[in-house]
Image: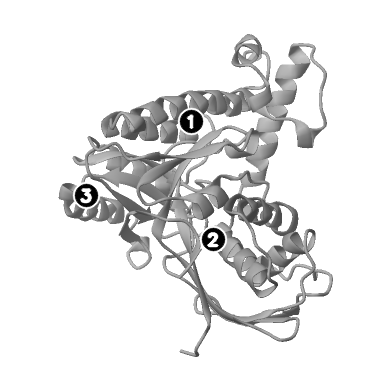
Amino acid sequence: MKEYEFHIFSPYRVCPLGAHVDHQHGLVTGFAINKGVDLWFNVNDDSYVKLVSRSFDGEVDFDISQRVQVKEKHWGDYARGAKYALSKRFELRNGIDGVIQGSLPVGGLSSSAAVLIAYVMAFAKANGITLKPFEVVQIASEAEREYIGLNNGLLDQACIALGKNDGLLFLDCDSNDWRIIKKNPLMPEFEIGIFFSGLTRSLVNSDYNLRVFECKTAAWNILAYMEQPLKSFDKTFLRDIPKDSYEKTRDKMPSRFARRAEHFYSEYRRVRQGVTAWETGNLQLFGKLSFDSCESSINNYECGSPELISIYNILRSLKGVYGGRFSGAGFKGAVVALVNPLFKQQVESVLTREYLALYPEYEKTFKVFWVKPDDGARFV
């Protein structure tokens, strides 16, 4: 491989509790994991960015000092998105020459946020810009919302940039307050199983954005029935509405919107309970809450392909599995689970056999990986 001066590792992330609520300013938890994206690069004397990928075809070449180009619906859009958000704050003069590579299949682990964070950090380094970790989170999230077109919150970027290998990230997406909750010494050991269905997906092309709008419509319904003033759609969040207002109006609004709100309020409660369980080392309860989160994702948030639901149902029946849920938006992608290491081979064997009996067409694309929590994005 060509010699490169700099190397960034930007991990993928998993979210055991706090599903589909960051965009409504809810409470979330997460881990960075020890698989992710590697970006090797040199700083150029001129303003050109030249990138190749070991995961996708083609090359990327653009001028970092010029106004951002129109999206090309190509993996290079993530580099352009990082440039877009960073250039709103700083003057960018130096480009990079680099190669990027992901270590797991795309689907459910926020690979898009991982690459955006890597590019933000690389472009900042090339231009002598010093960023605090939460600034990286905000810039990468802005790139994904405003340039890529995914109306997400801060969950993915926060896990990737702020994660620690010895604790759980707890983030309030309303105040942006966050902390790492160290693993209780009494907590049993666990590893994180990642079960790829064999399907891949793009969040921008899934129902992700539609669900965001449905949550906001639920909030509007509550406010309207309570005869409260309405805010513009972009400033409307379920977090700003008391749960008792929802309880008084849930039967009046279309059931679709009531279910979206029910998921938000019940997930808020589960995260609160989960944080206490984690602090006290109660992994059994923490895992059960993660399973309950997935149940609500299926029934209230209405995401999950038949394949993902099948993986989830199999996992619920297996000994040694503390808990788990869909990872990412939950339309295709993967299921993640917290598993007792003593049972992981048995879990993998039984789940693989039972899943492929249902979906033999995924024999070549279904994958199982075992990972552990890791530190956040960093220069290696």
Question: 304 or 79, which lies in front?
Answer: 79
Q: Position of residue 21 (x, y in %)?
A: 57, 35
Q: Residue at x 74, y 79 (%)?
A: 62
Q: Amino acid at mark 2?
A: Ala
- Under circle 3, the secondary element is helix
Using the rendered view, name the quadrant where residue 85 is placed: bottom right
Front disc: 2 or 1: 2
- Which quadrant, please, contains the C terminus? bottom left
Front disc: 3 or 1: 3
CA–CA distance in space, label 2 to label 1: 29 Å
Q: Which residue is mark 3?
A: 347
Q: Amino acid at mark 3?
A: Val
Q: Position of residue 77 (x, y in %)?
A: 68, 68
The circle drawn on residue 380 is none
Q: Is residue 297 left or right of residue 173?
A: left
Front disc: 2 or 3: 2
Q: Amino acid at mark 1?
A: Asn
The circle drawn on residue 299 is 1
Q: Earlier in the sequence, mark 2 or mark 3?
A: 2
Q: Is residue 190 left or right of residue 218?
A: left
Using the rendered view, name the quadrant where residue 285 is placed: top left
Q: Which residue is mark 2?
A: 114
* Image position of 239 with respect to 234: above or below: above
* Image position of 218 with respect to 74: above or below: above
Using the rendered view, name the quadrant where residue 321 is placed: top left
